[in-house]
Amino acid sequence: MTATTETAPFPVDSRLQGIALAYRNPTQSFIADKIMPRTPVATKSFKYLEFDSEQHFSLPDTKVGRKSEPTVVEYVATEKSATVFDYGLDDIVPIDDIEQARASNIDFDPQAKAVEFLTDLVMLDRERRVAKIVQDSANYASTKVTNVSSSAKWDNNTVNPRNLLLNALDTPLLRPNTMVVGREAWTKIRQHPKLVSSVSSADNSEGAITKQQLADLLEIHQVLVGDSIYNAAARGQDLNKTYSWGKHIALLHINPTASAQSGISWGYSAEYGKRIAGIILDPHKGARGAIVVRVVESCCELVAAKDLGMLFQNVVA
């Protein structure tokens, strides 16, 4: 039998992959990875556990008699199937551009810049996907979703967001450790007199609180503010600046060590491999050909325990 050699149609470039993995846009504060942490899976199609939290926390009798057997318990979860999706983008860099950059005295790498540009867009798309999942009422138990009425908005000084949040945090079976809030809502509620007074040593209703002050007040690990924006207009139309995270607040129990087969968390992201970057030669583009720069990641966002979260929709006007 004659051995055959297969040529990879998309050779990964280790230098460009390093840029794609390390890149962080300093102007965009992405929070998706903190809300739905990445956990590796061995294959693109995999099994994961969805928890019935009520049964998971039912306490069995643990007492064992001198000659009796311990109570038999069953790990309560439903095994489900899922598949990761590939998310990626291409950018075309003409050979002319690469040669001109090498010949100049300017420290500029067209391929590296293309990787940064593409990575930023791939991350922004993931941010928008996770935001939609967090804001979707179907991803919570029906009793844990509140659509705030116009007369009870949290930017109304007669409403007390502190009491509403403290009471809500004690409702899920596992106390949420993370608050997720969109920038539009955060800008208003952080100036709420009742919240300002709650963290101020003086009786002062003016000013604004920080994320850390609110986290300390609520006794949770973190307050995450979604700042990312995108252009929702169709190609060729005027800019339509849109906040990914809207005017909502979610209270979530997030376990960063949870995986598809162990640990319980409101949600996480299954990731197949790491984000990759590479180049493909295209001799048909430009006078001297071009390099197609590609950035790809393979992941799947999963909600594994709906009972471990609460959603307040449209908290401000």
Image: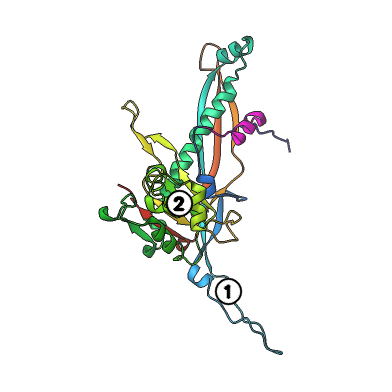
Indicate the position of residue 208 as horizontal and vertical percent values: 43, 45
Dot 1: few (<14), some (14–19), or many (≥20) neighbours within 10 Å? few
Indicate the position of residue 28 as horizontal and vertical percent values: 49, 35
Q: Which residue is mark 2?
A: 202
Residue 19 among magenta residues: yes
| Disc 1 element | loop
Q: Which residue is mark 1?
A: 74
Horizontally, residue 29 falls left or right of residue 276, namely left
Image quarter hosting the N terminus:
top right
Instruction: Report if the CB atoms under discs 2 and 1 are less than 8 Å apart.
Output: no
In this view of the protein, which residue sits in the foreground, 179 or 83?
Answer: 179
Q: CA distance from mark 2 to mark 1?
A: 53 Å
The part of the chain drawn in magenta is 11-26
Residue for point 55% across, 29% down: 116
Horizontally, residue 188 falls left or right of residue 58, namely left
In this view of the protein, which residue sits in the foreground, 14 or 307?
Answer: 307
Report whether residue 84 is seen.
no
Horizontally, residue 125 falls left or right of residue 298, namely left
| Disc 2 element | loop
Report whether residue 73 is seen.
yes
